[in-house]
Amino acid sequence: MSKPVQQLERVVIRFAGDSGDGMQLTGDRFTSDAAFHGNDLSTLPNFPAEIRAPQGTIHGVSSFQLHIADHDVLTPGDSPDVLVAMNPAALKANLADLPRGATIIVDTDEFNRRNLAKVGYAVSPLDDGSLESYHVHALPLTSITVDALAEHALTRKDKERAKNMFALGLLSWLYTRPTSTTERFIKTKFAKKPDLLAANVAALRAGFNYGETTEDFAHTYQVSAASMPEGTYRNITGNVALSYGLVAAAHRAGLRLVLGSYPITPASDILHVLSGLKRFGVTTLQAEDEIAGVGIAIGASFGGALGVTTTSGPGLALKAEAIGLAVSLELPLVVVNVQRGGPSTGLPTKTEQADLLQALFGRNGESPVAVIAPASPTDCFDAAIEACRIATAYRTPVILLSDGYLANGSEPWKVPGTSDLPDLTVTFTTEPNGVDADGNPQFQPFLRDPETLARPWAIPGTPGLEHRIGGIEKADITGNISYDPDNHELMTALRAGKIAKIADTIPDLVVDDPDGDARVLMIGWGSTYGPIRQAARSARLTGHHVATTHLRHLNPFPHNTAEVLRRYERVIMPEMNLGQCAMLLRAAYLVDVQSHTAVRGLPFKASELAEVIRTTVDGLEATK
Amino acid sequence: MSKPVQQLERVVIRFAGDSGDGMQLTGDRFTSDAAFHGNDLSTLPNFPAEIRAPQGTIHGVSSFQLHIADHDVLTPGDSPDVLVAMNPAALKANLADLPRGATIIVDTDEFNRRNLAKVGYAVSPLDDGSLESYHVHALPLTSITVDALAEHALTRKDKERAKNMFALGLLSWLYTRPTSTTERFIKTKFAKKPDLLAANVAALRAGFNYGETTEDFAHTYQVSAASMPEGTYRNITGNVALSYGLVAAAHRAGLRLVLGSYPITPASDILHVLSGLKRFGVTTLQAEDEIAGVGIAIGASFGGALGVTTTSGPGLALKAEAIGLAVSLELPLVVVNVQRGGPSTGLPTKTEQADLLQALFGRNGESPVAVIAPASPTDCFDAAIEACRIATAYRTPVILLSDGYLANGSEPWKVPGTSDLPDLTVTFTTEPNGVDADGNPQFQPFLRDPETLARPWAIPGTPGLEHRIGGIEKADITGNISYDPDNHELMTALRAGKIAKIADTIPDLVVDDPDGDARVLMIGWGSTYGPIRQAARSARLTGHHVATTHLRHLNPFPHNTAEVLRRYERVIMPEMNLGQCAMLLRAAYLVDVQSHTAVRGLPFKASELAEVIRTTVDGLEATK
Amino acid sequence: MSIDLGMPSSGVAFVPHLPDGATPLGRKDFTSDQDVRWCPGCGDYAILAAMQGFLPELGLRRENIVFISGIGCSSRFPYYLDTYGMHSIHGRAPTFATGLATAREDLSVWVITGDGDSLSIGGNHLIHALRRNVNIKILLFNNEIYGLTKGQYSPTSRAGTVSKSSPLGSLDTPFTPVSVALGAEATFVARTMDSDRKHLTEVLHAAARHRGAALVEIYQNCPIFNDGAFDVLKDKDQAAARILWLQDGEEVAAGDHVAVRADDGSIQIVPRATASPTRIVRHSIDTEHPSSAFALSRLTSDGTLAHVPMGVFRQISRPTYDDMVRGQVSAAVDAGGGPATDADLAGLLAGRDTWTVSG
Amino acid sequence: MSIDLGMPSSGVAFVPHLPDGATPLGRKDFTSDQDVRWCPGCGDYAILAAMQGFLPELGLRRENIVFISGIGCSSRFPYYLDTYGMHSIHGRAPTFATGLATAREDLSVWVITGDGDSLSIGGNHLIHALRRNVNIKILLFNNEIYGLTKGQYSPTSRAGTVSKSSPLGSLDTPFTPVSVALGAEATFVARTMDSDRKHLTEVLHAAARHRGAALVEIYQNCPIFNDGAFDVLKDKDQAAARILWLQDGEEVAAGDHVAVRADDGSIQIVPRATASPTRIVRHSIDTEHPSSAFALSRLTSDGTLAHVPMGVFRQISRPTYDDMVRGQVSAAVDAGGGPATDADLAGLLAGRDTWTVSG
Ligand SMILES: Cc1ncc(C[n+]2csc(CCOP(=O)(O)OP(=O)(O)O)c2C)c(N)n1
Ligand SMILES: Cc1ncc(C[n+]2csc(CCOP(=O)(O)OP(=O)(O)O)c2C)c(N)n1
Ligand code: SF4
Ligand code: SF4
Ligand SMILES: [Mg+2]
Ligand SMILES: [Mg+2]
């Protein structure tokens, strides 16, 4: 007597509840199920800034949004089709994001006077008609869960805690997902606590069965598997992908990875992940501060390791002076900056792209570094490898600009084969590379490779190559201290030239213009990739032709950047800052790149950008 | 029987010798004499990086260049007409800067085998004909001095030390200057050491008389007084002028000046000068590091003082995070950055302009600050006052970008009357400025002045206005912590808008185009002012019409900047960096500003820039 | 209870007090309108409550009290007090406090910091503020963990701490904050505990009374990431045997044990029965030499909390930095005949070596 | 003289030595081709000469020795030694050294720093390197002044120092570097002097032998900005009465005076005649408790140099941070069956929760 199934191309679900309600876990599990089912997907967790904000308050609301589809997915979705709200705060905090007609599932047990008052509801919104344009399923989730666990020898509190599994079970039923993968997960997680294991499985199944039985839901939905390239997939967040990228790069370079880091949101997880990977020869040092973190990385690089440091904006500011030293020493260094809302402490748990100019210019003197940014959570893996490639090949600091959205967002990842990863083998210099005035062999620490302008990497322990490096200007070739004006001019040019030369080994910009006749280009960098592509898709559906392209390398820019920009009558650049990259492009190419900016701590909505495209295209047509 | 006098419009003299030879003092004294005589002038000291480099080595050479003229002087001169070289190292280090036909005065006593060998002269350049295109006066300065002091009861060493006074006496004679002001100076300086007093005066006079008597010099020169605006003048270096500007601003604002600083070349002298001005209520704290220095200044500002911190490039990097806090707190703060050669430790005693982008962007997040730069040593005074005006009126950090050349260079300064200085009176908020939800009076720390967008400055000790500020994003008006996306967008815009609004109270760019038909504009900022003006003058002499203008405010730019830039067919911007300000102008106005850059640790030569102007003008004419 | 306010040697000597007969302030006057947002059960609540109870007792005008914090859970503290406050940046609170305290002698300046804030990123500012003896009161909430960033080990975490960033156990020898402070020339160093309202309040009084830099280490429980770190001191029975209550002039003892000076210069805790009476440590907070206080501070360095001195380790009198800085300035101003006038400024600008150009 | 090189407890245990029978290196081998650029008479010359004489005695391969410095006159040191070297940035040398020493157990890593570099801007890194016990040797050239920036007072300048930035005398209580180090859990702390080549060399040997962080304070004369700061210790007669040569197991004494433990826990210097024999301090460098060493360190805190302990204050054995870090890594690697293979990496990337899409 199973209910009718309705086919959907895509659905966006948001789980929201109190910090203690386990919404992140619920979201994660649903994600795993969807992934396992073969959907393409993208996720967006959203944490409160407090560790445990007071229960039932708006500040304590934690949510997890998930976009699943039968085709490739580019963003976690603009607005949820389904909201699961575990309490009044969760409803209130998220309602504004819902389009009319969305489905809302609420736990009526929590809609008591106290909880309503906490968030300023005089009357329950379930009763005052204010939700009439939504499909509301008001269920006493807590008490049904407790009832379902009547037989279990647990405290009432523990039973109540299982309500997230009940909700998950219900959603699994609603979207015709088997509960088996989550059951497996629960079994591993609670292996040592058989009581909780049994209760959670029971709650999950009860939720599933509730859907099947109750008349509240008329039919179930099905989102078919997306057709994705052949391969083995897993789901992965940006921070984990980035960590793995660093490990993979060190592995392929044959170098030890040494991380010097100081905890800071939203970068700390990279430290956490890497500190668990000692089996891969990874050394992590939790330093006394950010300066020590980068100092440790530079010291390790001097010793022939791959020195890495990870941080977020305020930490990058503190590392500035030492990064400048690394520029002068010309040693490999990877600086990962997971951007968050600024200025100052700003919005630590929110996303932003406002550290681009800091990355490029936040040091004294002419102090060029390479800067690259991943485009999506999975791209964090490849971007980390690329950062390591540039750092080691060019003996330079590379700043890798991730952001809070990429860090915590997740998507399916086609697991690469290790042999498909680039070979990053590094050769240390072991022999003198020149002769002194008397013709005797000599090591010249600043004699450069003509291709890359990189200087030799000769590490302590190598006999005969003893040398000293430092932050005072040094003479070309010999590396001795030099105050000579012409030498300073030359070295400044060489350092700049070396970074510029990186452009020779990076791919050209690729333009996506399926119609072939777009007059408007939308260009992005970093995590705006998904929303831009998605926006272009929807704009094209309404006949608005647009080209898109994406900058992964922010310094240097790809060789064809000028040519691409000049090809279009209008160039629009959405950024989660006040137009930082647009400024760089305008200055470099004198192209009237138009900024579209938002500084709201949230990724762009594809619909917002689609509207920008439409307006621009229409405006252009009008003036034809 | 006095010798014939030849009239000169201008002369550039460089004194060069070992660090221990007292060249800075000699130069200073000659400067005072020239100033007293009524010349306009400009000076350029050049120190070795070492405290006391080994005697007789190139590294130990210290020099002081002085440009005096009977008309207004804009630079310390491109190349010396006269070089006084106290030893072979001084000759070798400076010879390349001399034009053919220049006069060289050397102390032959120091041209012994040992000293020649130290700098790699196999044969004395005095003997090998290599100086034949110069007018060389080779005199045994040391021994004449010692002889002249035969009667004095001093050690030989002490007598030898007086040779700089002998040289000064000789030059005084050569340029028909009385020795009286220097004699007065010696009398004060050695008041407690009568032996040294007598010897130095005697050496000075002996030098003067030597010129009069010897046949080595055929005639003397005279550089007449320049016609300068009526007033009282003194000579002043940029660092002293800047220090006085801060004191004057605090005085006119009615605020206590609190400096938090950590020593660093070439900014330390500001700390030194201010620490001697306690009589003016100035508090100076030497902090444990640069971060503490700026922290102290911010803490003092919170308490209602004028908080100032002074540093150079690497120190500015360290202060970045705290400056970001001040941006978020919206408190007045003046950050003086005396730029030096970079990156990293770089060239600590040399000048550069490469911290502009660091000043603008060297912080996490969108973190706008005002940036201004003095144009000349004396302008450091006015620029410091302007920085304080902006900081207090707009409650914002202001970064004042001086540089190594301005810091140590000097020129005559028309001493301003105190009442001519702007009134910077500040009013603290003392009453509630709003009402709470219940209509009770309330203090709203982020309710802004509609004119300036500045928030109220209510200092501890004010009853009823207790409030908390911090670096987390805060709600508009109330200042409470807010994670609201729209509020963050608003506050980001308000902070940016506040800085933009400063443009309403700064003067428009003034264009200097005496011919009125220039097609080429040369635009500068900071210490390139002098060389650019001087270059334009000489270019005009050869019929090359050029306009010049100068940016004193780097953020925001004056309102008419776009209009001025667009007025010309070619815009050239010389900078002592790789084109930082040009980048900003290109991005802001899409004008093809052409960079002319040099990163040599030295100011531009006017002749070099004149050549740039001529080539550009000629090129433009050719394409007509 | 009320403290000696009039003495120039008091920490609040120049801070305006409520006029005689004015209605005393109460806890409510020191409670701001912001929701407190620590986790349920966090030790910070107890400290806040103690502070709100204590502040009125100082008798100061509320507007002349300032709290400055760094970043961390503990550093949210100033938001909850209705005084002036600054929630600054990580580790730097002592610098802002130094600037403020030096610029303004009429303020009572308190620094709130955590073990990471003060001893990891901020270690340098802490030791410099202490050696300078700036008149600020530094309350170090030591929960032996990074709370705000969700549970990494801190410089006071016991060796071997398993945390997010040390899955196999931390390897760093922890600091003993009291030892660090004493090595850094601190004039006032004390220790107390979140849950002991009475003792906490006493120590706060002593700190306020001290003219100079006061470091107060407060053992604070973080139920989320390091729960129970100090439980053995909260259990009455265990506490009796473990806590050595430091009282000036009194023997240092806990239960039937007493502190004695050993031959090697250390202080050992032995059964009173076996202690040679001449060796028993009689606590003196104001000896010039910090050696005894230092030896006491070592009792906790093994991390077992077997013997924990609580109270004021050291409180000596030394001129404060801010008083001296102001003294130099005001001496110069007085010598110049009062605040600088326009004429004085004109004199400065002109200097001694001018010349005149006339029209 | 030669040191115990084979012991895993030695500071250079895993650093390659010259093979038996190889020509020993000499002073020249450790002299770089760069001109030395300190002022004439600077104490740094003597320290450099001592170091160039000492390094060959270590018997190490030259290429396995690294000197890392901050910024300051003293920090120019590495340029003059023909080893690997890094002249880094102000105050941060311990951080680079920590990274290097942890990444490479086969190096002998030395940090050269000044009193400003290590205790002003770099104070935090110093105390953290010490508590962690990283196997690095930190030589602190203490001239009680900022030399390179031309003579401002430093954190070790005596109170009242008139300098460019303190024209009316400095107001900050100076640090006693040895006290700071002991308060920060240092395992090895010593003091010596530029002009005493023999003692300096002995102390360097002891530091090199120590497995862990060694802090060596070297009194160094700056003839330009702080001339004669230590003259009373260089005058033979005065030195005899002032310097307490610390020798493990020996009484602490100078001339006819001897150190005794006072009732208040401090160490006092009294005429031997009046000293109660049971109170006389017999120095022990390896007591677990740093209290006695700390008490000794206070003897110089009044700035008079009346009684100056010289030598090793403390040298205890504690596992080093870098050894333990490497130990955790290699244990994990061993447990995994040796260095990670491609297959191991593949396993990591895939994780435990994959699904397969087939064409
Ligand atoms: C420059 C900088 N680095 C790192 C952080 C992240 N951060 C904030 S608080 C904190 C540590 C908090 O620990 P603690 O001081 O012990 O305070 P608690 O939360 O335990 O009260 C860290 C690492 C930051 N905000 N700023
Ligand atoms: C970030 C930074 N701040 C300041 C300086 C300037 N500076 C260089 S060395 C120094 C102090 C040197 O004193 P010390 O460490 O005692 O060394 P010394 O010269 O006496 O050997 C200072 C303040 C700098 N180079 N970098
Ligand atoms: S994480 Fe710990 S210290 Fe922070 S608020 Fe929660 S319980 Fe308190
Ligand atoms: S200034 Fe002092 S410390 Fe520096 S080199 Fe000269 S004498 Fe030595
Ligand atoms: Mg903590
Ligand atoms: Mg020094």
Image: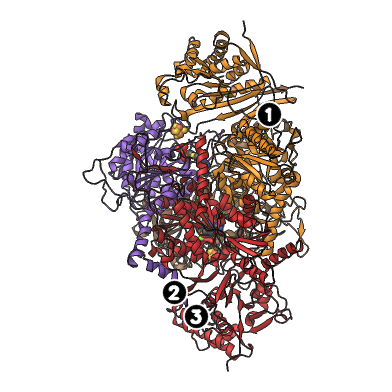
Chain colours: A orange, B red, C purple, D brown
Q: How many marks?
A: 3
Q: Is residue D39 left or right of residue D242?
A: right
Q: Could you say where residue B327 lies in the image, as x and y percent from the top left? A: 49, 47
Q: Is residue C258 above or below residue B243?
A: above
What is the C-alpha distance between the residues marked 3 and 2? 13 Å
Q: Could you say where residue D66 lies in the image, as x and y percent from the top left? A: 63, 53
Badge 2 marks a residue whose secondary structure is loop
Q: Quadrant of residue A123?
A: top left
Three-letter residue code for mark 3: Thr
Q: Residue furthest left?
A: C21
Three-letter residue code for mark 1: Thr
Both marks 3 and 1 on one chain: no
Q: Is residue A227 left or right of residue C65?
A: right
Q: Are marks 3 and 2 in contact (CB under 8 Å)?
A: no
Q: Is residue D195 among what the camera can see?
A: no
Three-letter residue code for mark 2: Arg
Both marks 2 and 1 on one chain: no
Q: Residues within 10 Å of mark 1 (few under 14, many from 20)?
A: few
What is the C-alpha distance between the residues marked 3 and 1? 85 Å
Q: Is residue B142 left or right of residue A452?
A: left
What is the chief secondary structure element of the magenta stretch? loop
Return the residue at label 1. A542
Q: Is residue A496 above or below residue D50?
A: above
Which of A255/A63 is in front? A63
Which of C303/A139 is in front? A139
Return the residue at label 3. B182
Range shown magenta: C168-172
Q: Is residue B546 among what the camera can see?
A: yes
Q: Which mark is residue C352?
A: 2
User: Magenta stretch containing residue C169, yes or no?
Assistant: yes
Which of C310/B600 is in front? B600
